[in-house]
Structure formats: C-alpha cells, structure tokens
Amino acid sequence: MPKFQNQTISFLTKRFREVGIRPVSRHGQNFLIDMNILDLIVRSADLGPQDVVLEIGTGTGSLTTRMAAAAGHVITVEIDEHLYTLASEELFEFDNVTMLQFDVLKNKNAFRPEVMETIKEKLAEIPGGRLKLSANLPYNVATPILSNLLRSEIIPYSMTATIQKEVAERIVAQPSTKDYGALSIWLQSQCRCEIVRILPPSVFWPRPKIDSAIVQLQVDDELRGRIPDLEFFHTFSRSIFFHRRKFLRSVLMSAFKGELEKNQVDEVIEENNLQPDARAEQFTPDEVLAMSEMFRQKLHSIRG
Ligand SMILES: C[S@@+](CC[C@H](N)C(=O)[O-])C[C@H]1O[C@@H](n2cnc3c(N)ncnc32)[C@H](O)[C@@H]1O
C-alpha cells in the first residue's frame, strides 16, 4: 500500500519555507488540506488501470500520488516551476506519472499542443485506454479547461474537478434561472452533470474567499452524437447569451449580423414558430441545439 503525502498546513508551510516560496494567488494556489476530500475526488473519478488521467495543477503532488495508485497513467501539468520541482521529489518514484511544466492553455480557447500529444502517446500504450480529467483546478482557468476539453481532439470519458461553487451552480443550472447560460447548455448537452459535494474554504490552504464544489461530468456519447456541428453549436449558444435580457429576435439579429439579412432571420423565426419575444434563458439545451441547427441549415442553403 503506497504511503501518501499528508498535505497538512504544517507540511505545506514547512516545505514552502524550505524552498523560500509562498502560495501565488494569481495561479489559484489553494491546496487541499483535507485528505478525505482528496480521497473523495479519486473515488468520484472511479479510476482504473485503463484510465489515463489528466491533472491540471500538480501542486505538491498529493492528489497525483493518490490517482497514480489507481490509474493506468497520470499526466500532470504545473505552471509554477518551484512547485514542479517540489512535486518532482514526491513523484519520481512513480513510473506511471508524466510531469509537464508549463501553462496548460495555449490561449483561452485551446490547450497547449504538447498536452494533447502526451495524452495520445499514453493512450496508445494502454489497450482500451480512455482519458479522464481529474483535478483540483486553478479557479481562474477552470471554465476554459472544462469547456475546451470537449472541443479538443481527444474527448474525455469523464471530468471530475474541484471548482468554484458559483461555476458548479452555473454548470448544473436549469432554464429560466439566473445561473443558466451558455456554459450550462454547452456542458449539459454533452455530459451528465452533477455536484458531488460543496466544499467550505476551510478545506484549503490558504483559504479561498468563496465556497467550492466537486463536480462530476460524465460525457455521454449519445448526447454528443446528436450535435452535427460542435463548433457552430458552441458559437451559437454563446452568442445568444451575449445580451441575456434581450428578446430572441434581437439577439439573433446581432448573432448573424453580416451573415444573414434581417428578413432571413425573420424567415427562420417564422418557419420554425419561434417566439420572437422569448429570451435565450428560457430554452432547454435540446431546444437551443434545435435552434442552432435551423440557422446552420439556413446558412448552408444560402451559401450552397
Ligand atoms: C488549486 S491548486 C491545486 C494543487 C494540488 N493539486 C492540490 O490539490 O492541492 C491549482 C494548481 O494549478 C497550478 N496552475 C495554475 N494555473 C495553471 C495553468 N494555467 N496551467 C497549469 N497549472 C496551473 C497552480 O500553480 C496550482 O499548483
């Protein structure tokens, strides 16, 4: 049975003092100091030998070691070179851990290519291998990480992550509520989404100012198979929420400005019995997908 790092406040403060560093808030460095929560993340991710795990934010490696004991392979990415060095001391014994040191995102919309290359390489080594994201995510980039992975070359089997409670609530929100928006639609139209546990600030060091949550997103191939053009749907669902209080007709006019004439937008609205004075937030993910298809086909018929 491997002996896991006991990431308590005294362990962290001692190690940080030894190497002369402090937690960097702009990198979302809030470390989990409740070992039961680390175990809960690993249990929720339901890891097995066929799983290649992508962890974003190695920190000192305490979640990494727990996941490495259960998974086929763990690819862990850390932006901070001091933490990377610290974690290397912890992780060098694990031959199923690949450590990468850089910003996981190339930009807000895409992962760094090296991350995808490493995932492909490791998946190829495990027969029947599948990708799972499992991480205590840095909060400033949690939303792009979860969103972008569903637009990447390698679609994960599931995503289990600690994120801000406020973002978790947006992910699972129902139509006609204040939290419902493009993120809810994008994730719910491809995954079964649930909040596993709400976490108070006291389970982290340093304590964040806000509550957090563990979310579990199970990617559903059947749901994804119903989306003919992911990129179009992604752009469409974002654009109809740019002005969430505006009526649908006006929102659609802005969304297709330069691509469709006003009368062409009205044609789609009339032909499909859409309510011009409805608001985007009233539509379920299925209804937004259907609407997105109406417009995709209209554009297709015009462009030929
Ligand atoms: C919330 S901490 C989690 C640390 C550790 N896994 C734990 O559970 O205690 C987030 C970690 O992500 C790292 N990080 C922040 N932004 C990053 C980025 N863009 N790419 C890679 N790592 C990043 C931070 O330096 C930090 O170590």
Image: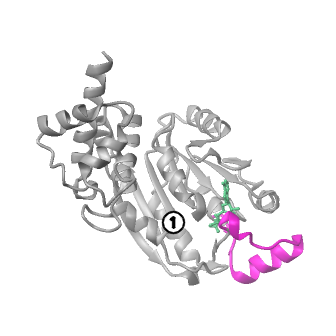
Picture residue at 68% right of the left edge, 59% below the top: 58
Question: Which residue position holds label 1?
Answer: 163
Q: Is residue 200 magenta?
A: no
32 lies above or below 47: below
Q: Secondary structure at mark 1?
A: strand
Picture residue at 66% right of the left edge, 66% below the top: 62
The location of residue 187, given as percent across then percent down, is 38, 51
Q: Is residue 196 left or right of residue 202?
A: left
Picture residue at 56% right of the left edge, 59% below the top: 135
Q: Nearer the viewer, residue 245 or 147?
A: 245
Other-residue count near label 1 (Cα within 10 Å), few / some / many at <14 / 14–19 / ≥20? many
The location of residue 11, given as percent across then percent down, is 75, 78
Region in magenta = 1-28
Q: Quadrant of ligand 1?
A: bottom right
Q: Amino acid at mark 1?
A: Ile
Q: Is residue 124 left or right of residue 217?
A: right
